[in-house]
Image (spheres, coloured by chain):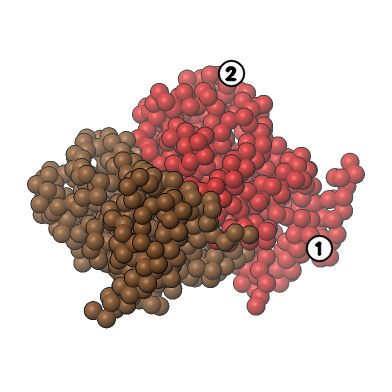
Chain colours: A brown, B red
Amino acid sequence: MEKRYLFTPGPTPVPPEVLAATAAPIVHHRGPDFRVVYERCLTRLREVFRTENEVLMFVATGTGGFESAVANLTSPGDRALVVSAGSFGERWAAVANAYGADADHLRYAWGETPSPDDVGERAAGAKYVTLVHSETSTGVVADVEALASAAHEAGALVVVDAVSSLGAVPLETDAWKLDVVVTGSQKALMTPPGLALVSASEAAYEAAAAGGAPRFYFDWARTRKAQEALNAAFTPAVSLVAGLDVALGMVLEDGLDAMFERHARLGRACREGAKAMGLELFSPDNDRSAVVTAIRAPAGVDSDELLLLLRDRHGVTLAPGQGELKGKVFRIGHIGWFDVFDIASALSAVELALTELGAPIERGVAAARAFEAYDEFAAA
Amino acid sequence: MEKRYLFTPGPTPVPPEVLAATAAPIVHHRGPDFRVVYERCLTRLREVFRTENEVLMFVATGTGGFESAVANLTSPGDRALVVSAGSFGERWAAVANAYGADADHLRYAWGETPSPDDVGERAAGAKYVTLVHSETSTGVVADVEALASAAHEAGALVVVDAVSSLGAVPLETDAWKLDVVVTGSQKALMTPPGLALVSASEAAYEAAAAGGAPRFYFDWARTRKAQEALNAAFTPAVSLVAGLDVALGMVLEDGLDAMFERHARLGRACREGAKAMGLELFSPDNDRSAVVTAIRAPAGVDSDELLLLLRDRHGVTLAPGQGELKGKVFRIGHIGWFDVFDIASALSAVELALTELGAPIERGVAAARAFEAYDEFAAA
């Protein structure tokens, strides 16, 4: 009966009231019991996306949602600019290539922050530009507003991977003129994985109507038409929708601005605690990086070994370094259903396990510094 | 606090122990707690599919799973034979067309049973033939073994929509040489909607490797490789997988043959009860039609009106007629978590509501006849 602690950036912990909603008896997706939930959930999604557009709901992961953008927008040979600085950016380049896009890959080293100037220079002639808002593999949150503006000036549509960012850090779909925004249920929206959520602008729908790749399940027009009639095109994941509705209610009761502030405070608490222990950050030490904190393992410690010890001896799950960062960094997620006590627990667990591994870190200071930094932010 | 009764052919009622499993705290999809469940679930799926092939798991509805077959198998202009005799067959024709297949649509009137001779004649030159095992819109369960054999003789791959049939009526993926079998979590597998399950033969993988349409999320090779390493390509719907694992355990504890017999008995009980009341069946009066029973509304009664009365006054949800059957038939599902008492309740509710609508039906006999027929089958 070892208790488990999940401090990963997705899937993230789900509040008990959301889990309970997902376990209610199944209702039929064309009946009034479901329609009430469905309509409210779709309305709440528009509020969370800060858009007037319909937020399309697919039974899929975030990758499926992102692929819907590529499938609806890519006719063979269309130019696309894919901006990447980590694992997820690389994935979107692979998806664009799979769809026969003439994809120009603006590739930064993992952990770098994409620059609006670079995007502006490279976006000319592109039908669309893909951006990653929060690169979960590195902890970097990009300045999507500035990047999108540069892409728009070059005449391109803007497609944003907001899978780990939406609800955690500010994202203004309409005010920033983001043509496509993709997220998933299992991050800041505090719901089990299984729903991909996609908003699209009129310009994006027009481009999709004029071309795109073969598609049916991920076709935007079909899903939009069905949703507008509250009559889902395909059997929705009714239990996940019921959970998402409850979770969105929680988010909006606090208010999005409170969510953003809480995430910024959690990020600062995590960074300050890690530094107090003597660890070096991999993700940038700024308040925009409020989603996940990537931390370098101390010299002589393999971060994968640290994570196995945490998981198998202590029941604490953190996220590993991916790709070229494997073995070098570990990541603490603080997206969604997280409070500062979770940060303190995660840091204390790291401190304990590093001590067990014989790493020369300072003990007994990380949690206290995390609480302090959390409060400093609020006072500032 | 009106109690609800769900007698639809999907989503179907989910056992409480399965719902409870879906509401357990979220685990990380790359950790050992999930891997144990994932591996057992994949093993159980092979048993339920009666195949040695990997059963690919997608976060999607049944339509997404079916589309994976079309996307992996269709290069532009490839000939495909689409066999349809109802709503779902029509949908697969639309999917094949969306992917640029040269689709020959062998189209029967809704409610007819496809003939192996017709398939044999038309399949020549087709890369694949799509079959619907249980046409949920009409209640017809086709003789997939004979149809598949005819398609194979003509040299075509066989793709089977087993969404509402798998687990309810006999389906032998390997013994019948079915190249692709698609099902969903929300029918006989007694799990909330959200998982599409797809088995593919080596011949199907070879055809996919040699061609197909642009794809990433639904790419079979990527998903197969990831599953074989127990390392899902994309974040799995961990809570639904936990539920499916429990449901499959229940199915296999009873045994598939017991499942098939129970469904056949439920089908017979439903048909006999409906006839005893004086109603006319739309679906065939044979024991293969064990999934859903389509019944004609009596003269002068609109079946949609009947269903609204059942739903809004009595809390009982049945399924309407679709497409050209709208208003003419209603359907009682008996897939998965159903026992004869559910059949009796559904028939009693229909009897009550038809009486309220002034239809001249015989009262007080349907449920008794259903129980009797259920027992007769077992004695036979």
Q: Quadrant of residue A228?
A: bottom left
Task: In the rendered structure, find residue B153 and report the number of the disc placed on it.
Answer: 2
Residue at image x 63%, y 68%? Answer: B311
Location of mark 1 (residue) = B362
Residue A253: x, y in percent? 40, 78
Q: State left or right for residue A341 relative to residue A204.
A: right
User: Callout 2 environment at 10 Å: few (<14), some (14 to 19), or many (20+)?
Assistant: few
Task: In the rendered structure, find residue A322 and report the number of the disc placed on it.
Answer: none
* Residue B350 vs residue A340, the one in the foreground: A340
User: Callout 1 environment at 10 Å: few (<14), some (14 to 19), or many (20+)?
Assistant: some
Furthest-right residue in this view: B379
Furthest-bottom residue in this view: A379
Q: Earlier in the sequence, mark 2 or mark 1?
A: 2
Kind of residue indicated by mark 1: Glu
Please state, as top left, top right, bottom left or bottom right, where the C terminus of chain A lies in the image. Answer: bottom left
Kind of residue indicated by mark 2: Glu
Residue at image x 57%, y 67%? Answer: A20
